[in-house]
Image (spheres, rainbow, N blue to C red):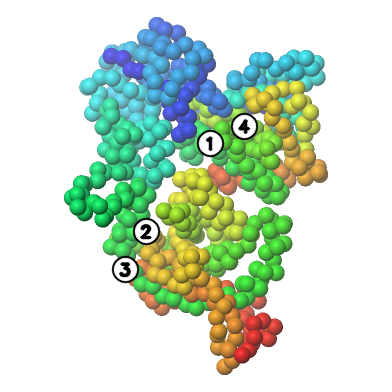
Amino acid sequence: MEYGRAWDLQKRLFDERVNNRMPDTLIVLQHPPTYTFGRRSNECQPAFNKHYNNDIALYRVDRGGGTTYHGPGQLVAYPILGLRSYTPDYYNYLRMLEDVTILTLGGYNIRAERVRNYTGVWVDGKKISSIGVRIIKGITMHGLSLNVNNDLSPFDWIIPCNIAGVVMTSMSEILNNTLSMQKVETDLVNNFAKVFDLDICNDVQYTS
Amino acid sequence: MSTKVIMPQMGESVAEGTILKWLVKEGEKVSKDQSLVEISTDKIDTEIPSPVSGILKKILHTVDETVPVGSVIAEISEEEAGEITEERAGEVKTPVTEPPLKAQVSEKTVQEEGEQRYSPLVRKLAREYGIDLKKVKGTGIGGRITKQDLSAYAVPEVKRVPEEESAREEIIPLTPVRRIIAERMVQSIRTAAHVTTTFEVDMTAIAKYREADKDAVQKGQGVHLTYLPFIIMATAKALRDNPLLNSSWSDNGIVIKKYINIGIAVSLGDALIVPVIKNADSMNLIELARESQSLAQKARDKKLRPEDVQNSTFTITNYGISGSLFGTPVIMPPHAGILGIGAINKRPVIINDAIAIRLMAYLSLSFDHRITDGAQADKFLSGIKDILEGWGTKSEKVPVTETGFGGVW
């Protein structure tokens, strides 16, 4: 789903959730190639300024964290949750999102870990999952991205998450194999349910 | 009257936040819960809602300023009369108010009974040392707990020992962890009616199974297959069959837990911590091996999170690793029992009137005699024994004679 449309959907569901008209919801999707700049994005991205040629959509968004790239083959999860029922601690929420990814990767025999002070999930020193969230009135939006099969080269032109020199990786790069997005998605959703101790009810398909 | 708006505590590990944008200007009206200001930390953006209705009197920190948690960032002068009752009720769920007036102090105490506020440092220290903050008396502003209060609680002043004695004796100050272990153990002995029963278990089948699989498991799964996951698995199964051992005593009745969360005692040199394997009965051997090792590692690295040590329903303690043959472990409250694993050694055993060499271990179960009696406890323990001895042969018992292993003297 195109980033702007997905963002609108998030905002709509967020409002629904704030007004208690909707239960906690998890959106899982893929975006076409898009760069997003978070509130903490470093303005100085020389390589980006030099190479950017309008092929890739560009959004300045209302989430924490720095710049990142989304594209086909990357799984994106946006939980719209009333956070207090799970944890009162905003940062523990980030740790829980990391757990979801770490568990999912574990199912593919990829040993992933946290790196202290660098939110996200890492495999052998390379970053595989990024996190940036917005929490207003106790309700969360934005979330995490997990590189599954996606092209990693667009990350070269930005400083992902303001970490200079970071190298990104993906599940397919590690396993040397293209993975079923459907399966990774199901695993991610199940692990989300596990970490947040939830039952997932039937998928609600979004039709515009 | 005016109310201060403070930079909220967004997480235990967060010390500051950056002001992104003021959504209300000085002098403008705000209503309660209206967003006042956008703030951001490294990964989270959020907004601070107004704690009260009123007029934004003063903005104390401007855009792009990074402000420590707990600092006052704005002042709101409240509108008089009318809505005040409503606001008071609302304050309970809004953690950002700090009413400065003495008249409100009594309300504030009520508000904070449910949810006391602590500084990040205090929370961190309390968690590290396992101190229950509710028991600590605060001497800071408004009864807040300071770091000094914590250390005073943790290490009370050591009474002076007369000069001549002090040369030949030494006092080791009690660490908070030591204090908590002491409290819990004494509480357990005082309340639970401890009985310990011991079975001898033939671990030869497990050893064979383990020998055959451990290299493959190490290579394929990256986990070291020890005896422990086998025992956890057998215990989880036996707990399912004997729910009384997976319960706690209460004056209203025995509370049977429908979930099986097994705590594993991990020795940390000067202390003991019991991380918990959640839903152990739903895990396979490899998962149990991986989980128990990762929890033990986290315990040693001091990386356990509160949820890693909570909600256990039964405990296993493996004193066999330090060579002990059997023990009489103390039940961890509020559990109904604790299983102790003795050292696994080769011993001469009589099988079919011949002496064989078998790998044997004593498993000891301490149970709370208030909850269950010896016969049921022994049924539980013999259930574990049967599973372990029959490993790999499904429900069958180990064959009575074994020629390929050990030897007949």
Neighbours of disc 2 within 10 Å: few (<14), some (14-19), many (20+): many
Query: Which amino acid, mark 1?
Result: Tyr
Front residue of this view, candidates B116 and A78: B116
Question: Dots 4 and 2: beta carbons under 8 Å?
Answer: no
Judge left or right: residue B112 versus residue A57.
left
Subunit bearing disc 2? B
Rounded to the nearest angstrom, the CA distance separating label 1 from label 2 is 30 Å
Give the x, y percent position of residue B56.
39, 11
Q: According to the image, label 1 marks what residue?
A: A93
Subunit bearing disc 4? A
Residue at 42% x, 7% y: name it: B26
Give the x, y percent position of residue B244.
42, 67
Judge left or right: residue A36 versus residue B181.
right
Q: Name the quadrant containing residue B216.
A: bottom right
Subunit bearing disc 3? B
Give the x, y percent position of residue B143.
27, 31
Question: Dots 1 and 2: beta carbons under 8 Å?
Answer: no
Rounded to the nearest angstrom, the CA distance separating label 1 from label 3 is 41 Å
Give the x, y percent position of residue A206.
68, 33
Determine whether the residue tagged by mark 4 lies in a helix, strand or loop. Answer: strand
Residue at 56% x, 25% y: name it: B42
Rounded to the nearest angstrom, the CA distance separating label 3 from label 4 is 50 Å
Question: Dots 4 and 1: beta carbons under 8 Å?
Answer: no
Compared to residue A157, the image places residue B297 above or below, namely below
Chain-order first, disc 2 or disc 3: 3
Q: According to the image, label 3 marks what residue?
A: B193
* Residue B112 visible, this angle: no
Q: According to the image, label 2 marks what residue?
A: B333
Q: According to the image, label 4 marks what residue?
A: A131
